[in-house]
Image: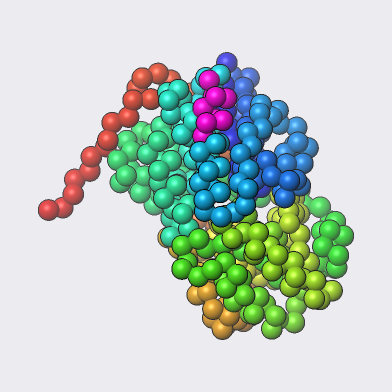
Amino acid sequence: MRTIAAVTSSRADFGILTPVLREIASRPALELKLYVTGMHASPRFADALAEIEASGFPVAAKIGAIPGDDSPAAIGEALGRSTAAFARELATQPDILLVLGDRFDMFAAVLGALPHGIPVAHLHGGESSFGVIDEQIRHAITKLAHLHFVATAEYARRVVQMGEAPWRVHVSGAPALDAIANFTYPAFDKLSKRIGFDCASRFVLVTFHPETLAGMPPLAQIEELLGALAGLDLPIVITGSNTDSGGAAIDAALRQFCATASNRAYVAHLGVELYYTAMRAAAVMVGNSSSGIIEAASFGLPVVNIGRRQDGRVRQPNIVDAPLTRAEIANALRQALAPEFRAALGNHANVYGDGHAARRIADVLEQQPLGPELVVKKFHDMKVPE
């Protein structure tokens, strides 16, 4: 039996990973070990950990190196302590370490695996997000990984361009679309109960994280967004920010904004079920979450994408980009909320996948030969025009 050690460090990656975890767990030839770290180790995100525990997946270990705060120095220190903790835990020598994305917590797991010679399988490589340090972390993980599962052919080309051998790179599609394709939505009254008002009416869904390379303080960033939202005559549902530097200050501002009106709701963590339900019901999504770029198109949901956090990712017709200023955000919201904009979206296929990524990923994890050929990497040279 082959052991796959999967890592989840945030509420976002757990939702994306869930179809893959289920597929792995269903195969007799594979044994799943789930390591939880990062956001899940923080009392601030207790609801996210509860969702994992309720999922039924066996948790092999909780590896917690919680930053004392969300300052750059504290995050750097937590990265070091998490790396050491993973290096100790991974002495158990799983056959493959499965990681996703670009978070510093995920980077710690990969660094911890490196001295053990454990093959690393990486999901969602080859993408770009210029406004955050995640950009560098994602590409660093690519160079440390041995198998790559990417969402689009464009991202596959980028991974090969980074020197990865083509046989290591698999266009699987985005696993989150598997969950959407097979999702059973609860009645809207369940979401209404959670947010405190009737979600059957048109509402705005907001998910905003710090843009760590914006050159603008986090509070200044959120003030621009809230200035634009204050002019809307629509209910607003806001989810909590993540653990990036400045996330706590943004959360405090979001809570205060929602406390000033009865038709505004702040929910730190909706969970996959209610988050997808909210995406299905919303009139528009606004913020800078990757879910707006990747998943929202599957719902035909217009998205106002703010700032540069998601710059570099493949765009779809449902996206309206806006700079981080309240006037530009307000203009983009008017465009996205226009009935003709949504009507023009029609039934476009989502370029990020077809809902069968988990099967493709598990097939490779099960069948890929292990040994020196996988672990010893050679740089794949490409011809460069002179």
For the point 57% across and 73% down, the residue is: 220
Where is residue 122? Give x, y as percent. 48, 38
In the picture provided, is 14 more to the left or to the right than 277?
left
Residue 259 seen anywhere in this rendered image of the structure: yes
Magenta stretch containing residue 361, yes or no? no
Magenta segment: 83-91
Coloration of the structure image = rainbow
Q: Specify the quadrant of the image occupied by residue 142.
A: top left
Where is residue 73? Give x, y as percent. 52, 50
Magenta stretch containing residue 84, yes or no? yes
Where is residue 334? Give x, y as percent. 62, 81
For the point 43% across and 60% down, the residue is: 130
With respect to residue 35, does 41 lie above or below? below
Where is residue 209? Give x, y as percent. 59, 61
Residue 8 seen anywhere in this rendered image of the structure: no
For the point 54% across and 68% down, the residue is: 217
Q: Specify the quadrant of the image occupied by residue 192.
A: bottom right
Of residues 39 and 322, the one drawn nearer to the viewer in this rendering? 39
Q: Residue furthest left?
A: 386
In the picture provided, is 32 more to the left or to the right than 83?
right
What secondary structure is the magenta-colored segment mainly?
helix
